[in-house]
Image (spheres, rainbow, N blue to C red):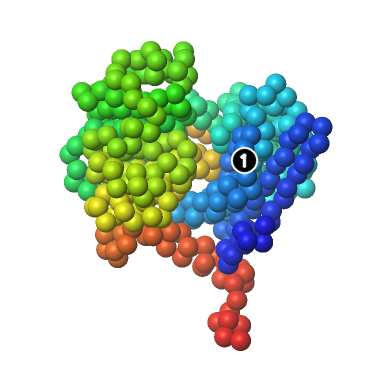
Amino acid sequence: MFDLMDEWGPEKVVTVNHQRSGMRGVLVIDNTSRGPGKGGTRMRPDLTVGEVASLARVMTWKWAAVDLYQGGAKAGIRFDPASPHKEEALRAFARMLSNEVPREYVFGLDMGLNEADAAILCDELGDRGAATGTPAALGGVAYDALGITGHGVAESVDAAMEHCGLDDRRVVVQGFGAVGHATVRRLDELGYRIVAVSTAQGALHAPDGLDVTELLRLRAEHGDALVEHATGTRLPAGAELTLDTGVLVPAAQQGVIDAGVAGQVRARLVVEGANLPTDAAAQQVLAERGVTVVPDFIANAGGIIAAAFGMRDRYSPFGVQTAEIVPTVTERMRTNTLTVLQSAAEHGGTSHEAAGQLARDRVRRAMELRGQRPTPERMAL
């Protein structure tokens, strides 16, 4: 576990093991120089500590890149979210982290968890502020109804298109879950043509554009199996990544575009809706080929902007004031996208490097002000 540590963090790693349910979990608090730890909580049966630590670091940079005062953190539960014993695992996880939650970390929603799960976490700790993402009926943010992360991804696409002067409004979206479907919905409203989408069960392609209304209806009825019912040409999952298109939005799992796939990408703009969909080698290949990339911790930050409202208002008797969220997400997403792409153009290097430098400068300054970094005199010793 010491191999996870560097000059930025993590500050604390807590692992828990609940023998009765078989639940194993981890909380990684990466860097709190700009505020208390905040990041989503995910559940999946093959989760690893390294995965959660990587995502916690992403949260450190993401909060700093959007210039919001929270620290990077992430929690994970190694358990099957489809298990009938999910609630028992959730309650055990919350109890075993009661020393850290909510003073040092506040639960949030990520893969495998939903609004009802957030309510259970709060109930177990007897603290309304133990989680964000609770149902609107309990004063929380209706993330699913707002589709706020996907909305932000779509706004990032539109801002990047303007920056690059691209006029090819064909879009491929890999993944049609919470982020992907909301991205498609907003891009359709903005006048883009969705030529392919995919789920875990395969991809659909229609060069003249898919029927978005049909896709959204079939998703509600069939989930990932929508690809078996919608109009379009079936392709194996993954084939959509190299289709001829103007824009590619990877909005599913991490690591889907390596250097080999990057060499075959035909989109002129890649906007990372998922966390860590590309690695450093892929980013370099894309940059060398002249493909513009909006990094994940810029493109999918709409969710954390909404989470910031949830953090601010989670104890309010009025609940979260959702009327502010969408306009704020729209404005910040467009501004941050342009800032990063302009910085990359001015200073060279990849957009990930430009975004990372912006975030590191802000975190470094906060650490210096708090006395958390060695002074030049100590570093010289």
How many discs mark residues in the rendered view? 1
Residue 31 image offset from top left, x and y in percent: 60, 58
Please give left or right for residue 127 compared with residue 370 in the image.
right
- Structural crowding at the residue carrying mark 1, measured as other residues with C-alpha within 10 Å and reported as few (<14), some (14–19) or many (≥20): some
- Relative horizontal placement of residue 206, taking residue 322 as reference (left or right): left
Residue 264 is situated, as x and y percent measured from the top left of the image, at: 28, 43
Q: Position of residue 343 (x, y in %)?
A: 31, 60
Give the image location of residue 351, x and y in percent: 34, 55
Residue 181 in view here: no
Can you tell which quarter of the image residue 111 is in? top right
Quadrant that contains the N terminus: bottom right
Q: Which residue is mark 1?
A: 47
Seen from this angle, which residue lies furthest right? 20
- For residue 19, side relative to residue 302 (left or right): right
Type of amino acid at the residue the image marks with label 1: Leu
Of 233 and 184, the residue lying toward us = 233
| Res 235 quadrant in image | top left
